[in-house]
Each structure stands twice: as structure tokens, then as C-alpha cells.
Amino acid sequence: MSIAEFFSMGGYGFYVWGSYAACALAIAAEIVLVRARLSAARRVAGGREPSQ
Amino acid sequence: MNWFRFASPASFYPLAARLTPWFGGAAAVFAAAGLYLGLIAAPTDAQQGESYRIIFVHVATAWMSMFIYLVMAFWCAMSLMFNARLAAMMAQALAPTGALFTALALITGALWGKPTWGTYWAWDARMTSELILLFLYFGYMALRQAIDEPRRADRASALLALVGAVNVPIIYFSVKWWNTLHQGASVSLTSAPTMAAVMLAGMLLMALAAWFYSIAIALTRVRAIILERERHAGWAGEVALAAKAAR
Amino acid sequence: MTAVEAEAQAPSPPGAWHGVAWAMRRDLRLALRSKAELGVQLLFYVMVVALVPLGVGPDPALLRALGPGVLWIAALLASLLALPRLFAMDFADGTLEQMALSPYPLPALISGKIAAHWLATGLPLVAASPLLGLQFGLGRDELTVLALGLLLGTPTLSLMGAVGAALTLGLRNGALLALLVLPLYVPVLIFGAGAVDTVRTGLGATAELSLLAAALMASLVGATLAAAAAVRMALD
């Protein structure tokens, strides 16, 4: 496949790339949020922040 | 080695911290391989053209959505049988990821449905069951959230998850029956293209990637949960400060 | 007297069936005192059913097609509405705690409560359904299967709903109970409404009704035990 064909996915680009993008976005968001949660928990447990 | 040593949150925490990068790394490797096979190596399908490539993420997310529910139910059963806090925390850590994969399975399924069968949502048996599974995940998380007292939250949500697990096959069977009743003869909405070996390999690699990712993210989330719930215990402060110092 | 003689003279612990009967009589007596509340719940059923033609138009063919589903869904919602009253008052005034501590097995007492609850809130729906079915143009066979299905299904709804009610005891969010319980209701809805559709095509609905009966048998045991466990969790 050429690059152009790769991106257009036979005209189905929206559906194929939409799916992969949704998954990538969701997973990236989850990673960011969970790591933030862990950092916050560490700060609270370490006494650097008052607990909620 | 005495594995039960790790049943306490305090001793499990450092183990989880050590294991996470390995699972995360494995997930990345499997994902890279799977994406290569799925997006580049696998040939174009005769009937569905390029749109079938969605299957590589759709199948992985759908399998994980169901598998995580089973694992969650397993930990819930452990928490009730052994009155184990850590088992309940593990279930608590798995639920959001399971819900996420369920939502992704629904989204990718809809995006696959439109080019293939002309409609985003067709109320077929698998997608409808997947939707109900999402409700079951939300129910578990909502119940946990609504109960203030942690022990009651653990036990009540564990019971709910088990009741849900028992009902999932019944619900699936009834939805399948409902679908055949109202559809009569016709298009099987679950037909996938006949599989070349490359396609199967791609699906398997993506599924493995999703599995190892789930483990890594659940181990991370459970560490946060452990610290949140055990923060008044002495070891929590030390571990938190030590982790900061090591960075 | 010796320990053996004392043991022989001690009254035997109350049997489970006594517990069921006692709880059922008590709850029925209490339910009959608040007839207005029960009437409102039945009225809710009738009104929700009446809303549907107002929402989709009075076309007889459309209503006939929707009828079984509507009547079942409305029954589900009415059932849901009545659930909190199963445990709420007893929980609030400490009676539930007394029941948990009593020598009667808790599952037995709870099954008695659920039986009374169904008689007061489920059975009226079954009785009203043929009349409401006429409003949707359902024929005699369809009405029979509808009523039979509801007769088998509404106790199952009460039983599974009891698990949800026990899990959410003391929590204020009413919608949470619906979120927990509605997925569990799905099979009953499918087979109950499906039974009427099957009869409509001329085939018998034995399969669906048998499945509903099986679900009832299974929940009689499973849901009672789960509800008892959940009540204990709330009381601890």
C-alpha cells in the first residue's frame, strides 16, 4: 500500500482510524489519570498534603 | 516461597511496583507487533475491504471487557471467602479498566458496523449484551461509590459482582434468543471475514497487548487505592517518601 | 437436672417454615395498613401504560405490536418503584436487626417478607394486565400468556429486586437501585414479552413460560440467600 492508501483505508479512513484513535486516546487518558491518582495518593500518604 | 505473604497490602505494594514496568513493556511490544500485522501486513479483505481492520481492536477490547469482568468477579469471590482487603482492592482496581474496554468495544463495534452493514447500531445479540455488561460495570462502581464504610462497600460490591457474573450467561442467552426471535432469517451480524493466518495472529497479538496493558494499569491503580485506603498505616508514609527519594 | 434432661426439655429451635409464615403474615398485615400506598403503585402501572399511546399515537397496529413490551416494561418499573419499602422501614426502626439476631434463619424471614411484598405489589399488576392489554388490542390467547408470564415473572422481579434493595439499604440514591437491578431483569423481560410475541405467531409459548418458571425456582433459592447475605452486610 502507498502512504495515501494507508491513510484513506479504501475510503473507510474515518471508521478505521476513528476506531484506532478512540482506543489510543482512551488508553492514553487512562494512563495519565491513573498515574496522577497514584502521585496524589503518594503525596497524601507521605504527609505532604492534607487528605480530602 | 510463601505467597500468602503478599496478601497484605503493605507487602503487595512494592511487588506491584516492581512488576508494572514488565507488563507495561510487554504490552507495548505486543501492541507494536499486532499493529504492524493488522494495519500493514494483513492483506485486504475480499468482502469488507480495508474496514475489516477495525477487527484488530474490536476483538481485543471485547474479549478483555468480558475477561476483566470474570477476573474481577474472581477477586470479589476471594475477598468474600477469605475476608481479604487486598482482593477487594484488586477488584476495585480492575473495574474502571473493564468498563473502558467495554465502551471501546461498543464504539469500535459501531464504527465497524456502519461501513459493513450500513448502521452504527443494530441491536444484535453481541453488542446488546456488551451494552448490558457496561451497565453491570457501572452498577459495581456506583455501588462502591455510594457506600461510605469501606468494608461494607467491599463486601456489597463483591456480592453484586458475583450476582452479575452468575447472570451474565443467562443474560447473553436471553439476548441471543431475543435476537433470533425478532430477526428471523437474515444477515448474521457477527460474521467476520474468513481468517487468514496473518489476521488471526494480529488479533491474538492485540488481545495479548490488551491483557498485559490491563494488568499493568490495574497494578498501578491498585497501588493508588492501597495508599488511599491504608494512608493511616505507618508503612504507607515511609513507602511514599521512599518512592519519591528513589526518583 | 442433668444436662441431657435439660436439653430434652428445651424447646426445639423454630423451624424455617414458621419463620416464613410469621414474616409473611406480619408484612401483609403492615401492607394492608397502607392500602393507599399500594393503590398508588398500581395506579403508576396503569398511568405509565396509558402514557405510551399518548407518546406514539393511537394507531391500533402499532399499539398491538408494542403492547406486550410496554406492559412488561411498565410492570418492571412499577416493581422497581415498590422495592424500597421491602426493607426500608424495618431497617429504620431496628426490626431488621432483630430479625437477623432471631433464632429463625434470616433467609426464611426474608423469603416471607418477599412473598408478602409480591402479594401486595406484584399480584395486583398481574390482575390488572389483561384489562390494560385490551387497551392495546391484544387477543384472548395473548392476554392469557401475558398474565401467566407476569404471574411467573413478577415474583422473580421481587426476588431479584430484593437483592438490590438489600445491597442499597440505607443509601439515599433511588436511581442506584434501578441501575443495579434492571440488567438482572432483562431475561425476565425478554422471555415474558417474547412469550406473547410467540403466541401471536401461532406457536405455543411453553418454552418461554417454562424458562420463566425455571428463573423463579432459581431465584427462590439464590436471591433469598443473596438478599440475606446483603442484609447482614448492611447491618454489620
Image (tube, coloured by chain):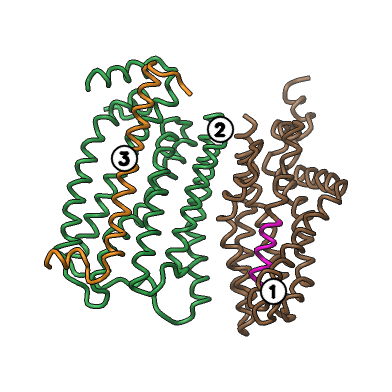
What residue did someone put label 1 on? C145
The residue at which mark 3 appears reads as A31
Q: Which residues are magenta?
A: C67-78
Element on which disc 1 rests: helix
> What residue does disc 2 label?
B152
What kind of residue is marked 3?
Answer: Ile
Residue C113: in magenta span = no
Label disc, if present, on residue C13 of the rendered structure: none
Q: CA distance from mark 2 to mark 1?
A: 42 Å
Where is residue B186 shown, x and y percent of the image?
42, 81
Chain of the residue where label 3 is placed in the rendered structure: A
Q: Residues within 10 Å of mark 2 (few under 14, many from 20)?
A: some
Q: Colour of chain B?
A: green
Taking C207 as reference, is A52 left or right?
Answer: left
Badge nearest the viewer, 1 or 3: 3
Rendered residue at 24%/54% (across/down): B206
Q: CA distance from mark 1 to mark 3?
A: 52 Å
User: What is the residue that sits farthest to the bottom in this orientation?
Assistant: C202
Percent coordinates x, y for residue C29 in the rendering:
86, 46
Residues marked 1 and 3, same chain: no
Give the residue drawn at x 52%, y 29%: B150
Amino acid identity at mark 2:
Arg
Amino acid identity at mark 1: Val
The hue used for chain C is: brown
Chain letter, colour orange in render: A
